Image (tube, rainbow, N blue to C red):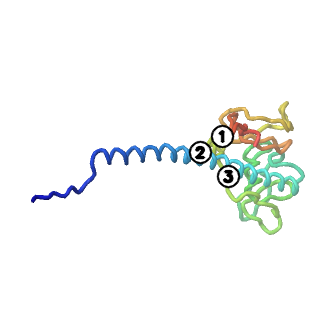
Amino acid sequence: MNSKSNAGFTLVELLIVAIMLAILAAIVVPQFANTTTEGEEAALKADLAGIRSALELYRQQHGSYPGIVAASGGSCTGGNAGTGAVNTVDAVVEQLTLYTNAAGQACDLPVGTNFPFGPYLKETSLPENPVTDSAVVAYVAPTTATAGSLSMTADAAGAGWKYDPTSGKFIANDTNNDSVGIPFDSY
């Protein structure tokens, strides 16, 4: 009596396992894709909340939103003074990320009590919009016809953000909708 032992899987068994794995992958993979999109949307909302809070705190302490006055012109002994001119994105970034005085002039050091305010953001620049991957800010100068509009919308000009220093409105500059159909610029 000769007995052989079959130690292995048949082709049919391997095909059944492969089909089961394919079905599981078809169910699980879309869940991961949604998680990435939802993560980007949550990060966008968090970035907007942080920047908007910084803008409001700056306004409370200075009487106007960043960018309305120049970040340059301060006496910054031992440090580097701001260089942002009035109505520029550079002034906004410096006024949010450096120390400032009551006039909005910026310095990278508090220099005693000469620059007692800020910094309002921990980063040295504005974060990238996590959906558009751009940190560029479309600045609505106070001299433009749409300045101060609370109904400001995105213009899809390739910038990650859009900011109006007259109204303090800061939005995602994206004309697309999120995963549930809400426009990004209405966050």
Whether residues under marks 1 and 3 lie with C-beta atoms below 8 angstroms apart, the answer is: no
- Lateral position of residue 106 relative to residue 174, left or right: right
Tell me the element at label 3. Answer: loop
Query: Which residue is farthest top?
Result: 145
Q: Give whichever of 22, 138 is nearer the camera.
A: 22
Residue type, mark 3 in image: Ser
Tell me the element at label 2. Answer: helix
Whether residues under marks 1 and 2 lie with C-beta atoms below 8 angstroms apart, the answer is: yes
From the viewer's perspective, is residue 133 above or below residue 153? below
Quarter that holds the C terminus? top right
Q: In 3D space, how far apart are the residues under numbered discs 1 and 3 (Cα atoms)?
A: 28 Å
Tell me the element at label 1. Answer: loop
Return the residue at label 1: 179
Q: In 3D space, how far apart are the residues under numbered discs 3 and 2 (Cα atoms)?
A: 29 Å
Residue drawn at x 74%, y 35% is 154
Residue type, mark 2 in image: Asn
Q: In 3D space, how far apart are the residues under numbered discs 1 and 2 (Cα atoms)?
A: 8 Å
- Lateral position of residue 127 relative to residue 141, left or right: left
Residue type, mark 1 in image: Ser
For mark 3, does the 10 Å Cα neighbourhood hold few (<14), some (14 to 19), or many (20 or more) residues? some
Query: Which of the numbered marks, if any, corresponds to residue 155?
Result: none
Which of discs 1 and 3 lies nearer the camera? The answer is 1
Quarter that holds the N terminus? bottom left
Residue drawn at x 77%, y 65% is 110
Query: Which of the numbered marks, if any, corresponds to residue 34?
Result: 2
Q: Give whichever of 50, 25 is nearer the camera.
A: 25
Query: Residue 74: horizontal and vertical position, in percent?
Result: 80, 56
Quarter-of-image position of residue 15: top left
Query: Which of the numbered marks, if any, corresponds to residue 125?
Result: 3
Query: Residue 162: horizontal and vertical position, in percent?
Result: 74, 40
